[in-house]
Every structure is written in C-alpha cells, then in structure tokens.
Image (cartoon, grey):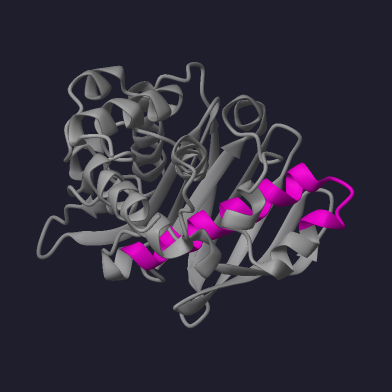
C-alpha cells in the first residue's frame, strides 16, 4: 500500500482541478478542509469521490463520502478501503 | 431557519460533468433520478434539485452546526414548476419548503422551515469577476447596502457576523438595548451571487 505521503501526493493530483484557493493548496496538510480552505465547490466533492474510486479501484459508499471533508479524512477512508480489499 | 444556493449554469458546465458515470447516483434519490431521466431539460432539473438540497443543508446547518456531505439523505419533492420558477419541499431531518428561480443563466433556490414561514427577501447579484474572495466580498457589501437602505439606518450600525463555522447573521445596533439579529444566507457561483434575508415580523 502507498505510504501516507504517497497517498497525499495522489490526492493532491486528484483535487487540484477543483481547487479555487491556490495558496491553501500550496500549504496543504492533513487538516486542510476541501470546502473551507481549498474553496472547492461542493458539487465537485462528488467528482473527488469518483476520481478516488477510479484511481484506487475502490468504492466510496455514501457513509464514507459523508465524512470526506478534509485531506486527512479522505486519506483514512482510502486506507480503510484498500485494507478491506 | 434559512438557507440558499445559486448555480451559474455556464460555470457549472465547465466545472461539473453531471453526465459522468456514477455522478447522478451519488447525489440523487431514485425518485429524483426519475425526475431527471424523464425531464425535457435534464440539466435544469439536476441543478434545480442540487440547489434545493444545498439550501436545505445550509438551513439545517444553522441549527445543528454539523458538517456532513450526504446529498442523498436530503430528499426533494417538486410541488410546481413553470418555465421561470419552481416550488417544492425538501426533507432533511425536518421538512423545508423551497422556492426556486429558473433562468437560462442561473438557478437559485432558498429553503425555509415549514413550521415558521416568515417574510423572506431574495436578491440576485450579477458579479463581474469570478474570483472567490471578490465574490464573497461583493455579496456581503450588497447585502449591507440593501439593509441599510431598507431600514434607513446608517451603514455603520449594521454588520454581518460570520463565525468560523460560517453561519451569517446581520447584527443591527439599536440606540438603546439589545441589537437585532437577523438570519441571512449568502451564496455565489460563477458570475452570480444571491442573498436571502429572513426578516422578523417586526423589523420592517
């Protein structure tokens, strides 16, 4: 499995097209909030979930998507799903 | 309890591909998917339902302050729809009523709790620039200008409070006694912004 740093790097590539605050993107950490910090449009959270599904060949169910609001929670969800594979 | 949302359709076309595989299924209930599938203008129905959901989410958030992204748990029913407007109800913990304006450029909704209908004022603001912080500042400025005129109160006595959790309220200083607090909701997207004011019965 990818290390946490690798997961963050992949996630950064996924979220980049939806980011509306470049500065916050440059300073991205696990605490970075997709909507509050990166100013991502909430309709694009669905795209992020779908992109993550495609990149890792996993399914992000609704219960997981509910919590996918920060970089850290997205990483946790991806790890859980990969472990369960 | 009030919440609103606006979708700039031109912007939405570049930002989101609602026809993408899996997209509709992640957001909409089966009943809503049926409305989209059978619509003559499915794009319009997609963004109308989306703005209804967002509005209800924001109204609920005012009460609960709980963040969560569960668009399928917010379910919409359409009551009436014409070429220019729609009304509906949205269930998300409680039932909200929604009003939507449909134009060829934007779609905007607001939601309010059925239990306490009050006196709502909605205003749409065309924006000149799509920069996120510019838009946010513009919508706030227009809201304050509007209220200052409406209440014949100097700008200095009104301010917009928005705590970290992002629930906005208008605070109007009173010469004597407690300030008046008025719930408002703001939204912006692409070249459009909107605000809704939940006027208390005695404010205007």
Place of residue B153 in the rendered image (x, y in percent of width and height, measured from the top left): 28, 44
Residue B105 lies, in percent from the top left, at 70, 32
What residue do we see at 41% from left, 29% from top? Answer: A14
User: Magenta region, mostly helix, strand or loop?
Assistant: helix
Residue at 44% x, 61% y is B57
Residue B131 appears left or right of B160: right
Position above or below: B188 against B191: below
- Give the position of the C terminus of chain A as an image quadrant: bottom left
Q: Quadrant of residue B175?
A: bottom left
Q: Which residues are magenta?
A: B36-61
Answer whether residue B91 is magenta in the image: no
Apparent side of residue B51 relative to residue B93 in the rendered image (left or right) = right
As drawn, the residue found furthest toward the left would be: B177
Quadrant of the image containing the N terminus of chain A: top left
For the point 53% across and 50% down, the residue is B122
Up/down of A42 relative to B80, above or below:
above
The image shows residue B97 at horizontal and vertical percentages of 58, 71
- Say left or right for B125 vs B36: left
The reply to whether residue B120 is in sight is: no
């Amino acid at each position: 499995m990818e290390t946490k740093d690798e997961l963050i790097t992949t996630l950064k590539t996924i979220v980049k097209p939806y980011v509306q605050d470049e500065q916050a993107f440059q300073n991205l950490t696990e605490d970075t909030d997709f909507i509050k910090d990166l100013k991502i449009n909430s309709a694009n959270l669905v795209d992020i979930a779908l992109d993550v599904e495609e990149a890792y060949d996993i399914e992000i169910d609704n219960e997981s998507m509910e919590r996918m609001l920060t970089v850290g929670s997205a990483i946790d969800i991806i790890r859980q799903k990969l472990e369960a594979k | 309890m009030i919440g609103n949302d606006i979708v700039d359709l031109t912007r939405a076309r570049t930002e989101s591909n609602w026809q993408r595989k899996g997209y509709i299924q992640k957001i909409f209930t089966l009943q809503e998917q049926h409305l989209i599938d059978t619509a003559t203008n499915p794009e319009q129905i997609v963004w109308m339902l989306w703005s209804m959901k967002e509005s209800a989410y924001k109204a609920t958030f005012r009460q609960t302050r709980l963040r969560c992204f569960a668009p399928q748990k917010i379910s919409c029913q359409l009551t009436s729809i014409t070429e220019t407007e729609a009304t509906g109800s949205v269930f998300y913990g409680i039932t909200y009523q929604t009003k939507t304006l449909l134009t060829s450029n934007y779609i905007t909704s607001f939601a309010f709790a059925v239990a306490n209908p009050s006196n709502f004022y909605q205003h749409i603001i065309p924006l000149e620039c799509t920069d996120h912080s510019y838009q946010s500042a513009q919508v706030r400025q227009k809201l304050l200008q509007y209220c200052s005129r409406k209440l014949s109160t100097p700008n200095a006595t009104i301010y917009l409070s928005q705590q970290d959790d992002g629930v906005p309220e208008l605070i109007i200083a009173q010469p004597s006694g407690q300030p008046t607090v008025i719930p408002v909701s703001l939204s912006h997207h692409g070249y459009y912004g909107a605000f809704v004011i939940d006027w208390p019965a005695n404010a205007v």
